[in-house]
Amino acid sequence: MGRGGRRFLSLPVIAVISLIGFVYYCTVFVFVESWLGLRSAAGICSALVFSYLALMCLASFCASVVIDPGQVPASFVPDMEGSDGNGVRLKYCGKCSSYKPPRSHHCRVCRRCVLKMDHHCLWINNCVGYANYKPFIIFVLNATISSIYSVVVFVGNILHNDHKFIERASSKLFNVAFGSTVMILSILLGTLLGWHIFLMCHNMTTIEYREAIRAMWLARKSGQRYHHPFDLGPCKNLSSTLGPNALKWWCPLAVGHLRDGLQFPTSRQ
Ligand SMILES: [Zn+2]
Ligand SMILES: [Zn+2]
C-alpha cells in the first residue's frame, strides 16, 4: 500500500466515510422512503439526486486523502534575484535545511515542507496543499449541499407525517440524533465553504490570511495599504485554483491546470 493508501488507516478518515454512508442510508432508505416512497417518480428522482451527491462526496473525499498535496523537489533552486522584486520574500526552512518555494510551509505533522500549504486536516489525515486543494474544496461543497439536502428531506418527512413519526418513542431518539447531526453539519460545512470561497476569491491560503492580518496592521501603522502579492482579481484567482474551464470546476480530478507549484504569478508581474 502506498503512502496515499495508508492515509485511509486513520480513525477520523474511517469516521468520515462511515458518516457519509450513515447519512446516505438514513436520508434515502428512511426519510425519502417514508416521505415520498421509493416507488414514486418523485421518490426515485430524489434518491438518484442524493445518490449522485453522496458519490461525489465520497470520490472528492478519497481524492483529497490520496493525492499528495505537493513536496518540494530536491532539485529546487530558489530564484534569489526575482524573489524580492515580486513582493515575495525568500524563506528558509530550518527543519528541512533548504529554501522553501513561495507559498510553501513546513507541516509539523507531515514533517516536511508542503507546496502552497493551507492547513493540515485531521479529517483527511493529510495536508491541504497545492495539488489536493481543489478536491478538498469540491468535497466541502458537495458535503454542504448533501447536508442541506438531508435537512430538507428530514423536515419534509416530519411535516408530511404530521409529526407522528417522532411521537413514537422508539424513533424519537433516532430522529433527534439524525436531525441535529445534519443540521450541525450544514452549519459547520457551510461556514467552512464560505471561508474558503473568500480565500479563493483573494488567492490566499489560511496561513497567508493569518500572515496578512499582521502585514495589514504593519502597513496601516506606516500609512500604507497592504496588498496580497498573489491577488490577481477574483476571476483569475478562481481559475488558478479551480481551472480555466468553469464546466470542469465541479470535477475534483480535473486538475490539468496545475503546474509544479513552485512559482506563482504576482500582481506586480
Ligand atoms: Zn520544511
Ligand atoms: Zn501536514
Image: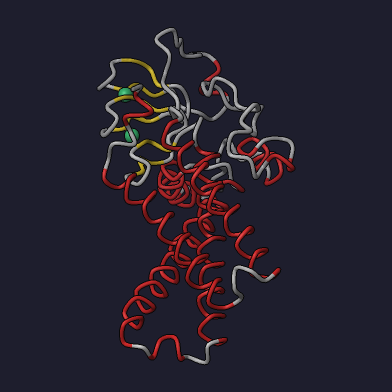
Which residue appears at 57% of the width and 42% of the height?
Answer: 203
The x and y percentages for residue 182 are 44, 68
Up-down: is 170 above or below 268? below
112 relative position to 20: left or right? left
Q: Quadrant of residue 92?
A: top left
The x and y percentages for residue 1 are 33, 22
Which residue appears at 25% of the width and 22% of the height?
Answer: 95
Up-down: is 45 above or below 164? above
79 relative position to 105: left or right? right
Which of 91 and 72 lies nearest the eye of the viewer? 72
Up-down: is 193 above or below 203? below
Q: How many marks?
A: 0
Q: Residue furthest top?
A: 75
Q: Quadrant of residue 255?
A: top right
Which of 182 and 120 lies nearest the eye of the viewer? 182
Which of 248 and 32 lies nearest the eye of the viewer? 32
The x and y percentages for residue 139 are 51, 48
- Here the colouring is secondary structure
Which of 85 and 236 lies nearest the eye of the viewer? 236
Up-down: is 50 above or below 15? below
Which residue appears at 63% of the width and 65% of the height?
Answer: 46
Which residue appears at 54% of the width and 48% of the height?
Answer: 55
The x and y percentages for residue 135 are 53, 40
Q: Quadrant of ligand 1?
A: top left
Q: Quadrant of the C terminus?
A: top right
